Amino acid sequence: MHARFGASRGRFLAMIVLLTMVTAPRLVAGGQAPAKSAAEIEGIWNYSSLTPIERPPEFAGKAFLTPQEAAAFTKQVLERTNMDRRDGSVDADLARAYNDAWYDRGTRVATVYGRTRTSLVIDPPDGRLPALTAEGQRRAADRAQARRDHPADGPEDRSLAERCLSFNAGPPMLPGPYNNFVQILQFRDHVVIANEMIHDARVVPLDGRRHRSASIRSWQGDSVGRWEGATLVVDTVHFTDKTAFRGASDRLHLVERFTRADAHTLLYEFTVDDPASFTKPWTVSLPMTKSSDQIYEYACHEGNYALPDILRGARAQEKTGPRH
């Protein structure tokens, strides 16, 4: 269920408030981080954006938009993604079962330092994701074949999103259809990155420790952080092969950077480095906007019959044979 429309504020928010009140001292000058005034990234941030991850073909060779182009592109995207439209599809009522009120993609394209980019990808310079390696292509083909051969033998065959396990909250974070909010809590020796989507929270140590053993892996990987001036750098390795971010393998090395651009903007950048999957590293730049809103509990499974119905449908199809 979309948390910002009906899911109650819950235990998660209370836990964060309690953590804020009773845990270690706040970030202070002279410790492992610069003075808080120079590196203030704490708060609730909205990272919704209409800017596509990759540069659209119509903007090939063009890294930035003029204000007029940005306004026209914004209008086009909002019209195209309006889920209340009933044109262009004979099954629109089914295909667009969520009406537009449930979506919260944002209302503008990403602008930082007064410039509006045509894509969130800033490197490679063409704004496009690099090609998959031969190994990455084989892995993608194997996954696609497995989905065709076993679309719904059991719940594990369905996507992580359908199973309410992982969405756009990352790491890394990317804009999704809704719940594009993250709360960051700063402390002297760690930072908490708590996403509204799926209410995932990462506790990132800043005490100079090394990564844990590669034999211990998790869906969110193992994150350690450090300060480079007023920029928080979070280094993450030891992912599993479950999330497969954009086709990445368990050898993904992710570097995230959080920099306060101005009073209302936190610049979030991340670099994906996975030679087993991509022919070159690639980098995304995503501005986040300071919000006075609150983080809400994301209730995904409660009253959700979608997955059982998918499995029931698969069993029925096995009995009657596929439709042609």
Image (cartoon, helix red, strand yellow):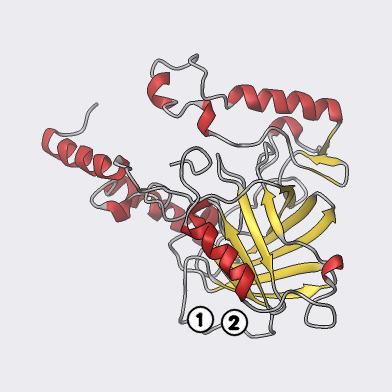
Measured as percent of width and height from the top left, residue 242 is found at 43, 62
Label at residue 214: 1
Would you place residue 258 above or below residue 288 in this image? below
Measured as percent of width and height from the top left, residue 244 is found at 49, 59
For label 2, the residue is 211
Describe residue 115's horizontal placement relative to residue 53 as left or right.
right
Would you place residue 316 above or below residue 206 in this image? above
Label at residue 323: none
Residue at the (52%, 84%) spot, across then down: 213
Q: Quadrant of the N terminus?
A: top left
Three-letter amino acid code at the position of disc 2: His
| Contact, mark 1 vs mark 2 (Cβ under 8 Å) | yes
Q: Quadrant of the C terminus?
A: top left
Mark 1: few/some/many CA within 10 Å (<14, 14-19, 20+): few
The answer, for residue 191, to whether it is visible in the render is yes
The answer to which of 100 and 311 lies nearer the viewer is 100
Residue at the (65%, 52%) spot, across then down: 130
